[in-house]
C-alpha cells in the first residue's frame, strides 16, 4: 500500500514538473513551428540561476522569480537573434537549437561545476505529512498543487483572454492572424518568453526535488518531447495528459523495471507515433 | 494629382531559379474595382502576396496611397487600411463564427492594454461584432464552430472578416472558387454592395464573375503583365485569346 501511494505521488509530482516544461514547448511549437531543443537549457539555467540566488539570499521564492525572469529574457534573445533566422527550416532549427543546448550546457558546467547540487527547500515544505498511517513528502504535495494551479492559470489565459484567443488563432493560421492586423512577431516573442520562464521556474522547482546536474537539460528535453508527441502539438490539454502519462510510466518503470528506465518513456511515444501520429489532442 | 490607392512599381519576385513575377507595374485608383486574370502560374497570387505584405518583392516597390510599404509587415499594412482574403479559406476552424469576427474587429482596435481581460469585456467591440453578424446573417448562428459551417458560409465569413474594419483597400483571392452557382451569385452581390470608396482587387478565374464585379481587367501571363483594359478590349485582344485558348490549334 505504502509503496503504491508513494509511487502515485512520485508519478504525479514528476508529471506536474514535466507539464511546466512541456506546456511551453507545445504551445511554442504549435504557434511558431519552432523545434526548440534548447528548451532543456531553459530548465538547466533556471535550476542553476535559482541555486545561485538561493545561496546568496536564502529565499526560495526570490530564486523562482529571478530564474523565471532571467530565463525569459535569455529565451527571448535566443528567439529574436538566432531562431528567427531559421524560421520554416526544421533541420536548421534542430541543428541550431541543439548547438545552443550544447553551448549552454558547457557554459553551465564551466560556471557551476560538474557536481550534482540540490536546492534547499523552504523549511515549511521539508518533511512529510502524515495521513491515514501514510507519509506524504510535503514538497511533492506542494509541487502537485502548484502544477495544477499553473495548468489552470494557463488554461484560463489561453481560453478566456484576448491574447489567448490570438494565440489559439495563431496555432490555427499564423499568416491569417498577421493579415487581419495582429503583430504576430510580438506575440511570438511573448509566448516564447513565457514558455522559457515556465521552464526556468521548473528548473528551480525540479532542482529542489531531483537536484540539478550536467545532463539534466538533455534528460528534460527528451521527456518533454515525448510528452508533446503523445499529447499532440500545440495542445495544452495534450501537454497535461501527456505529462501524466510520461510521469507515471517513468516512475513506475523505474520502480518496477529499473534496467528499462528509458524504455518506459519511449515505448508510449513510439506507440503513439504508430497509432496516432498527430498525438492525443493534436490535429492531423 | 491624387495618389493611387495601389501603385505597384516594377516588382520582381524571384524564388530560387523561378521568377514568379517579372517586372510588373500596376496602378489602381481609389474606389476602383479591378480583376486580375491569367492562367495558373501567371503570378497573380504572388503579386497579391506582395501587395498584402506576405512576400517582400525581390526588387521594385509597392505603394499604398502614395506611401512606400515594400518593407512593411502585413499587420502594419492592415492598420493602414488593407484587408485581404486568401485563395485557400483561412479562418480559425476551432472557433465559432462570433469569435472569428471578434478577432478580426479586435485586431485593429487601438487599445494595446488589457490583453489579459476577458474577451467579452469591451462593449464597443462587442457592439461592432453584433452589427456585423446582424448585417451578414449566418443562418447557422454566431455560436457555430467554423469547421461545421458550409463552405459557402465559410467564404462569406472570410469576406465579413475582411471588411469588418472598413478597409480602404480590399484584396480578394478567388473569392468564389469552389462555390455553387447560387453561392457565387450571393458573393458577387456582396462584392458589388461594398462601399464605393473601397478599392477592390480580385483574382478570379470565372469570367462571368470577373465581368460582373469589375470595370477594368489586368491580364497576367508567365509573371508579366500582358495588358489592362475594359471587358470589350479584353475579349477582343488576340494575345489573351492565345493565352487562354492556345496558339493556332
Image (spheres, grey):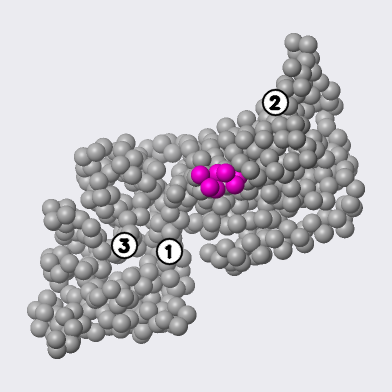
Q: Name the chain letter of the residue that bears numbered label 3.
A: B
**Do residues under tags 2 and 1 come within 8 Å of each other at their CB atoms?**
no
- Provide residue B76's location: percent of width, then percent of height: 44, 63
Residue situated in front as seen by the camera: A275 or A65: A275
- Principal SS element in the magenta part? helix
Is label 2 on the same chain as label 3? no
**Label 3: few (<14), some (14–19) or many (≥20) C-alpha neighbours in 10 Å:** some
- Residue for badge 1: B74
Camera sees residue B2: no
Q: What residue sits 26% from the left and 79% below the top?
A: B220
Q: Quadrant of residue B143?
A: top left
- Provide residue B195's location: percent of width, then percent of height: 20, 58
- Residue for badge 3: B87
Q: Quadrant of residue B178?
A: bottom left
Q: Quadrant of residue B159?
A: bottom left
Is label 3 on the same chain as label 1? yes
Amino acid at each position: 500500500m505504502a509503496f503504491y501511494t508513494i509511487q502515485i505521488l512520485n508519478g504525479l509530482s514528476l508529471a506536474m514538473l514535466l507539464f511546466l516544461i512541456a506546456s511551453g514547448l507545445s504551445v511554442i511549437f504549435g504557434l511558431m513551428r519552432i523545434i526548440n531543443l534548447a528548451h532543456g537549457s531553459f530548465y538547466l539555467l533556471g535550476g542553476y540561476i535559482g541555486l545561485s540566488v538561493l545561496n546568496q539570499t536564502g529565499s526560495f521564492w526570490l530564486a523562482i522569480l529571478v530564474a523565471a525572469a532571467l530565463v525569459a529574457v535569455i529565451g527571448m534573445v535566443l528567439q529574436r537573434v538566432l531562431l528567427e533566422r531559421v524560421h520554416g527550416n526544421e533541420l536548421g532549427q534542430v541543428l541550431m537549437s541543439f548547438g545552443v543546448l550544447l553551448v549552454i550546457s558547457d557554459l553551465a558546467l564551466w560556471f557551476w561545476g560538474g557536481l550534482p547540487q540540490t536546492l534547499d527547500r523552504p523549511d515549511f515544505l521539508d518533511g512529510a505529512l502524515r495521513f491515514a498511517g501514510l507519509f506524504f513528502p510535503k514538497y511533492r504535495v506542494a509541487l502537485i498543487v502548484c502544477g495544477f494551479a499553473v495548468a489552470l492559470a494557463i488554461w484560463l489565459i489561453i481560453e478566456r483572454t484576448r491574447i489567448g484567443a490570438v494565440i489559439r488563432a495563431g496555432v490555427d493560421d499564423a499568416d491569417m492572424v498577421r493579415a487581419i492586423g495582429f503583430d504576430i512577431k510580438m506575440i511570438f516573442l511573448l509566448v516564447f518568453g513565457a514558455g522559457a520562464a515556465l521552464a526556468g521556474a521548473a528548473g528551480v522547482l525540479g532542482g529542489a526535488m531531483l537536484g540539478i546536474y550536467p545532463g539534466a537539460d538533455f534528460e528534460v528535453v527528451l521527456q518533454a518531447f515525448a510528452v508533446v508527441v503523445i499529447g499532440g502539438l500545440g495542445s495544452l490539454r495534450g501537454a497535461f495528459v501527456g505529462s501524466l502519462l510520461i510521469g507515471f510510466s517513468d516512475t513506475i518503470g523505474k520502480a518496477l523495471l529499473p534496467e528499462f528506465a528509458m524504455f518506459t518513456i519511449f515505448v508510449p511515444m513510439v506507440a503513439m507515433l504508430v497509432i496516432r501520429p498527430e498525438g492525443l489532442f493534436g490535429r492531423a | 494629382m491624387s495618389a493611387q490607392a495601389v501603385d505597384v512599381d516594377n516588382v520582381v519576385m524571384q524564388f530560387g531559379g523561378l521568377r514568379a513575377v517579372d517586372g510588373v507595374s500596376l496602378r489602381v485608383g481609389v474606389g476602383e474595382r479591378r480583376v486580375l486574370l491569367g492562367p495558373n502560374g501567371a503570378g497573380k497570387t504572388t503579386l497579391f502576396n506582395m501587395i498584402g505584405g506576405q512576400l517582400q518583392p525581390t526588387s521594385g516597390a509597392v505603394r499604398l496611397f502614395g506611401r512606400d510599404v515594400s518593407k512593411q509587415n502585413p499587420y502594419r499594412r492592415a492598420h493602414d487600411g488593407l484587408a485581404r482574403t486568401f485563395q485557400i479559406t483561412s479562418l480559425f476552424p476551432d472557433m465559432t463564427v462570433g469569435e472569428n469576427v471578434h478577432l478580426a474587429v479586435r485586431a485593429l482596435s487601438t487599445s494595446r492594454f488589457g490583453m489579459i481581460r476577458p474577451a467579452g469585456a469591451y462593449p464597443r467591440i462587442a457592439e461592432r461584432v453584433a452589427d456585423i453578424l446582424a448585417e451578414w446573417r449566418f443562418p447557422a448562428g454566431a455560436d457555430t464552430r467554423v469547421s461545421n459551417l458550409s463552405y459557402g458560409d465559410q467564404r462569406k465569413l472570410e469576406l465579413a472578416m475582411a471588411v469588418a474594419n472598413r478597409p480602404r483597400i480590399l484584396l480578394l483571392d478567388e473569392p468564389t472558387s469552389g462555390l455553387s452557382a447560387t453561392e457565387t451569385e450571393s458573393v458577387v452581390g456582396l462584392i458589388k454592395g461594398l462601399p464605393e470608396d473601397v478599392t477592390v482587387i480580385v483574382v478570379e478565374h470565372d469570367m462571368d464573375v470577373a465581368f460582373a464585379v469589375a470595370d477594368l481587367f489586368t491580364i497576367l501571363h508567365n509573371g508579366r503583365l500582358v495588358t489592362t483594359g475594359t471587358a470589350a478590349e479584353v475579349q477582343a485582344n488576340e494575345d489573351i485569346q492565345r493565352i487562354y485558348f492556345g496558339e493556332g490549334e
